[in-house]
Amino acid sequence: MISYIIRRLLGIAVTIIFLSLGTFALSRTVPGGPWMKNAEIPMSDKEVAAFKEKYGLDKPFFVQYGIWFWNAIRLDFGRPFTAPELTVTQLIFKQLPYSITIGGLAACLAIFIGVILGMIGAARSNSTLDNVIVSYSVVVGTIPSFVLGFLLAYFLAAKLHWLPAGGWGGPRNWVLPVIAYGIPYTGGVALWTRQCLLEAMTSDYVRTAYAKGVKERMVMAKHVLRNALIPMITSFLPMFPGMMTGSIFIERVFGLPGLGQYFVQSSSNRDYPLVLGITMFWAILIALTYLLTDILYGVIDPRVRLTEKRS
Amino acid sequence: MTTLTQTPSTPATTSLSEERHYAGFWTAAWRRFRRNKLALFGMVYVTLILLVAIFAPYITKYKVEQIFPQDALQGPSAAHFFGSDYLGRDIFTRMVYGARPMLIVGFFTQIFGIIIGTTLGIMAGYLGGVVDWVVTRLVDLFSALPWYLIVLYLVMVLSPSLQNIIIALSITSWVGSCRLVRGLSMSIREQEYIEAAQALGIPGWRVVLFHVLPQATPLLIWAFAAGIPGAVFAEASLSFLGMGIRPPNPSWGQMLAEGGSYFSYWPHMLFFPSAFIILSVLAFQGLADGLRQAVAVNVNV
C-alpha cells in the first residue's frame, strides 16, 4: 500500500511538472503581456524594460522557469503583478475559504439530494416515480448553474425579497449560490446512484443471498449498499475539488470574492504569477483527491488490495 | 380460397420480415432513434435553430448593432418581439444572430476535437508501445484539470475571440474521443481480419484507414454529438465571463451577463437568453442520447 502511494505521488509530481512547464512556456512565448493590457496608459519601452527586469522576464526561458520552479517547490509563487502587496500564496489562502464554502456546500447538497433521489428511483425502478426522477435528472443536468443563479436571484431575491441577491456576509448569503450551484449536479448524482444500485441489485451474489434466505434488510445493507458504494465514492469524492474550482461562474453571478473571480480577473489582466499559482494549486488539490479516492477504493473493496499486491 | 391466396403471399412476407431483420445499419439506427421523444425534440429544435442561424438576415428586419435609443429597456412588443436592451438594441435580433457563434463553436470544436482524438487514439491503440505511453500521459494530464481552467488560460494567452475559443475548446475536447478510439482500436488490432490484412502485406496506414477507422465510425458519430452540448455550454460560460465572443457581436452568454445587471427591473433581458441556453443544451443532449441509443447496439457487437 505504501509503495503504491509513493508510486502514485511520483506520478502526480511528474504530471504537475509537465503541466507547469506547459503553462509556463505558453505564458512566456506568446507575444504581449501585462504591459500591453493597459491601452489607455501605454508603457514606454523603458518602463516595459524596467517591468521585465523587475519580474525577471528578460532572462532566458529556462532560467526563468528554473527560478520559478525553485521558488514554487517552497510554495513561493511570487507576487501578483496587479496586487503586489500580497504574495500569491497569501492571496490564494485568503480567498480560498469563499470557494471552499460555496463549492463544498453545493457538492454536499448535490450529493445529498441526488443520492436520495437515486435510491428512490432504484427501489421503485420503472415505476412512474422512477420515470419522473430520471426525467428530472436529465433536464436539470443541462441547466448551467449561472443561468439558474440569475433566475433564483430574480424570483427569490428581487421579487420576493426572501434572501439577499449577492454579497458576502452570513449564511443567508450562501443559500442562493449553493442552491443554484448544487441543483444542476443533483441530476448526474441521482442517475449514477440509481445505476450503481440497480447493477448491484441484479447481480448474482444478491440473488444467492436471497436464495439462502438472508433477510432483505441484511441483503441491502451488506451486499447491495456496500458494493454500490464503491463506484459512488470514486465519482462523488472528486466532485468536491471540481466544484470548488468551478465556482468561477456562480461567484460572478452573486458577486462573491472567491478564488475563481481572481482567476478570471488575473486571466484578463495577464497576471502570470497569479494564474500560474492558482492553476498549480488546483491541479495539486485535484490530483491529491484522485489519490485519496483510489486509496479509499482499496479500503472499501478488498479485491483491489489483492490485485495491487500481485502486480 | 384463403389458403390459396395465402400460400403465394407467404414467401413475400418472409422476405419482407427477412428484410426487416437484416435492415441496414442506418435503418435500424433510425428506428431506435425514433423511439426516444427527447431525441426527436432535439432533432427538430436543432434543425430549427440551424435554419434560424443560417437565414438570420431574413428572419429579423433589424441589424445586430442597430440602436433605438428611444426604445431602450422596453419589454416585448410587436416592434421588438423580445424587447430591447439597455442600449435600445432589439433582443430578438441579437438572439437570432447569437445562435451563430453557439453553433459554430459547437460544430467546429467537435470536428477538430474528433480529428485530434481519433488520430492520437488510433496511433496509441494500434501502434502501442511508446506512442501509447505518451498519449496516455497526455490524456491523464488533460483530464487532471477541469476544462475551464485550461480553456480560460488558453483564451487569456490567445486573447478572446471566436476562433480562439474554438482553438482552446478543441485542445480540451479531444480527450473523450481519444479514449474511446484507443480502446476500440486496441481490441480491433487483435482481430483476425487485421492479422489477415497485415499478412497480405497491406501497409499500416491502409489497414488503419480502411479496416480500423470504419469500425470506429458509429462511435465517432456519437462522440461528435455528445460533445456538442458541452461546447455550447462552454461557449455560453466563457462569453458570460467576458472571455468569449467580444461585443458588439452578440452571444447568448454575453447577453445573459448583461441581463444580469438589469434583471431586478427589466427581467426580459435575462429571460430570453436563459431560456434558450437551457433549451439548446437540453436539445443537443437529447439528440446525443438518441444517437447513442441508435448507434450503441452495433458498437457492442
Image (cartoon, coloured by chain):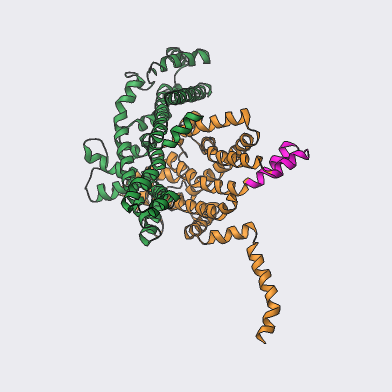
Chain colours: A green, B orange
Q: In front: A61, or A214? A: A214
Q: In front: B28, or A80? A: B28
**Residue A235 seen in the current view:** yes
**Position of residue A127 measured from the top left corner of the image (x, y, whole percent):** 38, 61
Q: Residue furthest front?
A: A212
**Position of residue A265 measured from the top left corner of the image (x, y, whole percent):** 38, 30
Label total for image: 0
**Residue A46 seen in the current view:** no
**A61 left or right of B253?**
right
**Position of residue A124 measured from the top left corner of the image (x, y, whole percent):** 36, 58
Q: Residue furthest bottom?
A: B1
Q: Which residue: 38% across, 53% down? A: A210
**Chain part drawn in magenta:** B192-215
**Position of residue A176 measured from the top left corner of the image (x, y, whole percent):** 28, 44
Q: In front: A59, or A72? A: A72
Q: Quadrant of the N terminus of chain A?
A: top left
- Residue A229 sits in which quadrant? top left
In the displayed structure, A83 sits above or below A140; it is above
Q: Which residue: 58% across, 57% down? A: B29
Magenta span contains residue A83: no
**B151 left or right of A147?**
right
Magenta span contains residue B200: yes
Q: What is the magenta segment's predominant secondary structure? A: helix
